[in-house]
Image (cartoon, rainbow, N blue to C red):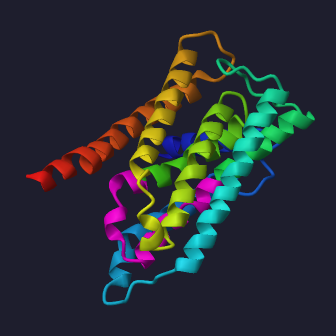
Amino acid sequence: MASTWEAVKDFYVWALENGDSRTDPWLLVYSPVPIILIFAVYLLLVALGPRLMEGREPFTLRSVLLIYNLCLVGLSVFMFYEFLVTSVMAGYSYFCQPVDYSNSELGLRMARVCWWFFFSKVIELLDTIFFIMRKKFNQISFLHVYHHATMIFNWWAGVKYVAGGQAFFIGMLNSFVHIFMYLYYGLAVLGPSVQKYLWWKRYLTILQLTQFVAIAFHSGYNLFTDCPFPDGFNAAVFAYIISLIILFLNFYYQTYIRRPLKKKL
């Protein structure tokens, strides 16, 4: 038992000390402990939130949600621009790109936008908190919690060890999708007068699935080529993205195919 505990401690120290020295000083990056605590509090709120709201009137939060969603639209635009422009200026390959660990202007610029992308995933945990406060418990599905909770760990590891390289492709695509996703959420807050024009929710899900398929091909391709980007990260991304494809396909089927068929019957 003692030797196992020593091995765990040794691995933890190794994990701390072998990160990217450029990103280690940045907020929430050096140690996984803050993210683990955030994750634990998040799951606790998911479990206890509905009970805490029992017997209470739901909050409307219209102004808060409008500002929140529009701010995330702006942040997503900024991140998409930074991923795209920095990758083009640095001559990134869209097939195989190692991490630039240098302190060059473009290397640091890419690392910074990777950090912003990671931090945006922490901010997006508020999506769930707002659902709880508004008593929209049906929105807090396994897919919702799984996706939000795991992304903070995925991108903590990304910023800690591989802030750039192949990772930019994921951040760029996801930021692009989130521009439209949070725009949709922001408009939906404005009520029935605007909601009747939001017929394109189905196509948001298709856009999300398209990005996942693109990321699966991107990471899968590099597992079978001699690309100087850690295979462990590509394998992890590939396995994770397959899980999201399965879950989102199920969501699409249940929401847009099975439910309408039931209504017709």
Tell me which corner region of the image, top left, top right, bottom left or bottom right, holds residue 96. Answer: top right
Is 182 situated left or right of 104 in this image? left
Which of the two residues, 113 or 210, is positioned nearer the viewer here? Answer: 210
Q: Residue at x 32, y 44 (%)?
A: 252
Is 100 situated left or right of 133 in this image? right
Look at the picture and state if 138 lies above or below 106.
Answer: below
**Residue 156's x, y, as percent?**
63, 47
**Residue 82's x, y, as percent?**
77, 42
Q: Residue at x 74, y 50 (%)?
A: 78
The residue most toward the right is 104
Look at the picture and state if 205 lies above or below 181.
Answer: above
Whether 128 is among the magenta residues is: yes
Q: Residue at x 48, y 66 (%)?
A: 188
Q: Residue at x 52, y 41 (%)?
A: 3
Look at the picture and state if 98 lies above or below 243.
Answer: above
Is 54 situated left or right of 39 in this image? left
The residue most toward the left is 265
Whether 248 is among the magenta residues is: no
Which of the two residues, 214 or 230, is positioned nearer the viewer here? Answer: 214
Which of the two residues, 218 or 161, is positioned nearer the viewer here? Answer: 218
**Residue 242's x, y, as percent?**
41, 32
**Residue 121's x, y, as percent?**
59, 54
Asked whether residue 22 is in view, the answer is yes
Query: What secondary structure prevails in the magenta region?
Result: helix
Asked whether residue 10 is in view, the answer is no
Stretch of the chain drawn in magenta: 119-145
Is 88 situated left or right of 189 in this image? right
Which of the two residues, 60 or 49, is positioned nearer the viewer here? Answer: 60
Pick the quarter of the image with the N terminus.
top left
